[in-house]
Amino acid sequence: MRDYDGTELGNVENAASFAAVPDAFQRLWTPYRIAYIKANSEQEPTGDDCPFCTAPTLSDEQALIVHRGTHAYVLLNLYPYNSGHVLVCPYRHVATYDEATDAEVAEIGRLTQVAMRVLTETAQCHGFNIGMNQGRIAGAGVAEHLHQHIVPRWALDSNFFPIVAGTKAVPRLLGEVREEIANAWPAA
């Protein structure tokens, strides 16, 4: 199987032919990604090289930021599960929700509500998956900096399992989505 630019993606196998109890998912074997996985699992980013600490130092366009608050900000996920997948992050480099201040928790909650309203308006989505993976063992890609995922969902979209385990096509460019969401974000 090849990517849109011709890059070899790996082999796709039908799970029905696997030993044990087959499931409905196909596996996309991507052995080239092991270098990325190993590099990112060997050490967690510090405040100096953390992508969520770096993002606010860049322009909104460069960092894909759609809104800056007082204690937290909203940006597009660089590797989205669906178009419009945003993250709400505190500015402070804090790892888990229980380490966040009351002000950070309140603003993360408020920004999540606003993001839902904006995404409902701009993307005409019908629902959301919202969550935080706390710690590497729980699936956090950047475990040392708290961030909440807001993933828009549609009625004809499939269930949550393909988002976690499968391959999704994301039909819109990140810059285009960032601009649309930022322009629809209500003034403070």
Image (cartoon, rainbow, N blue to C red):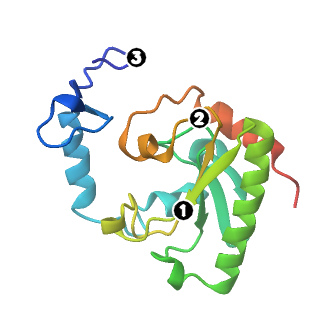
Query: Which residue is rendered at x = 53% and y = 30% of the image?
Result: 170
Name the residue carrying label 3: 4
Query: Which residue is rendered at x = 32% and y = 35% of the image?
Result: 25
Is 185 drawn above or below residue 52 in the view shown? above
Q: Residues within 10 Å of mark 1 (few under 14, many from 20)?
A: few
Query: Which residue is rendered at x = 67% and y = 48% of the image?
Result: 127
Q: CA distance from mark 2 to mark 1?
A: 21 Å
- Whichever of callouts 2 and 1 sits on the residue coming sooner in the sequence is 1
Is 172 drawn above or below residue 130 in the view shown? above
Name the residue carrying label 1: 131
What is the quadrant of residue 171 in the picture?
Answer: top right
Query: Which residue is rendered at x = 73% and y = 53% of the image?
Result: 116
Query: Label 3's element?
Result: loop
Position of 100 with respect to 15 (left or right) is right
- Whichever of callouts 2 and 3 sits on the residue coming sooner in the sequence is 3
- Label 2 is placed on what type of residue? Leu
For residue 94, the mark is none
Can you give x and y, in whole percent of width and height, for residue 138 in the image? 36, 66
Q: Quick one: quadrant of the N terminus?
A: top left
Name the residue carrying label 2: 174
Query: Label 2's element?
Result: helix
What is the quadrant of residue 104 in the picture?
Answer: bottom right
Query: Depth-wise, is mark 2 or mark 1 nearer the camera?
Result: 1
Q: Residue furthest left?
A: 19
